[in-house]
Amino acid sequence: MLTREKSRARQATVIDAYRQHSGLRSIPHNRHYVTLAGLQSFEDDREALSPHSEYAQVTSAGLVPLPKRQYVAFDTQAELIAVNKRVAPTATWLCEDIYAGLVRLHAEKKINPAIVFYDSMRLPQLGTVEASKLMVFLSKFRPIMFVANFIVHRQFVPSPLSNEEIFRSFARLPAYGLALRRGWSTDRRVYRYKGDHATMATVVFWLDRQ
């Protein structure tokens, strides 16, 4: 999904949100930008980087100034990772689950995220489970921003899920309660946009330095 609407959403909920909350234009040089890989090429040209891709956007905007050291992306699809390595070879593309990968890199002392973008293609009922689990683990890294993206309307979903339904999905989870006790917070604003095949909703969380 490399639409202009997606780019505008990423500008608002990742780039602008980080700058407004942190007061920094870029993530610090010793920190990482972590995300789900997604396809970074054009759909019809797997050899060219799309200007609407996440990698192109956050690096050209200066949010991630040293992509060779700072941009880390996960996906379990080996073919997608291979395409991304061709079109954006300076980034770190890892073929593994994001949670397992973060745990491994932390054990190896190779990760220090400033931003984690969980660009889920799941409905909140499932996506909030993984998001909450990630936030509990990410409590080790302060300050940090966590951005969670969910599908709220698509074919066979009878009506769009409300903002309150997203937060109810979070609230039912013990892991989310633990994340809140560890200091995570949100202003409960939800950014909605239309993707190629679904309506998406984004929530931003912060864990500030104690």
Image (tube, grey):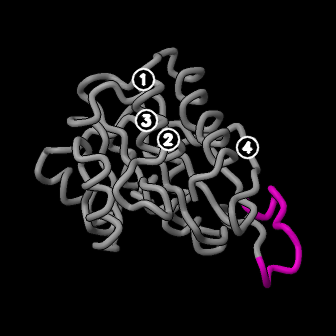
The secondary element bearing badge 2 is classed as: loop
Residue type indicated by callout 2: Pro
- Where is mark 4, residue-wise? 188
The amino acid sitting under disc 1 is Gly
Whole-percent x and y of residue 169? 69, 67
| Pointer 3 or 4: first along the chain | 3
Mark 3 or 2, nearer chain start: 2
Start-end of magenta stretch: 155-167
The residue carrying pointer 4 sits among few (fewer than 14), some (14 to 19) or many (20 or more) residues within 10 Å by Cα, namely some
**Residue type pointed to by label 4:** Arg
Q: Residue at x 26, y 64 (%)?
A: 82
* Other residues around mark 3 within 10 Å, as few (<14) / some (14–19) / many (≥20): many
Left-right relation of 3 to 92: right
Q: Which residue is mark 2?
A: 51
**Amino acid marked by disc 3:** Ile
Give the residue displayed 56% in from the left and 59% down from the top. 176
Query: Where is mark 3, residue-wise?
Result: 144
Sequence-earlier tag: 1 or 2: 2
Q: Quadrant of the C terminus?
A: top left
Of helix, strand and loop, which one carries label 4? Answer: loop
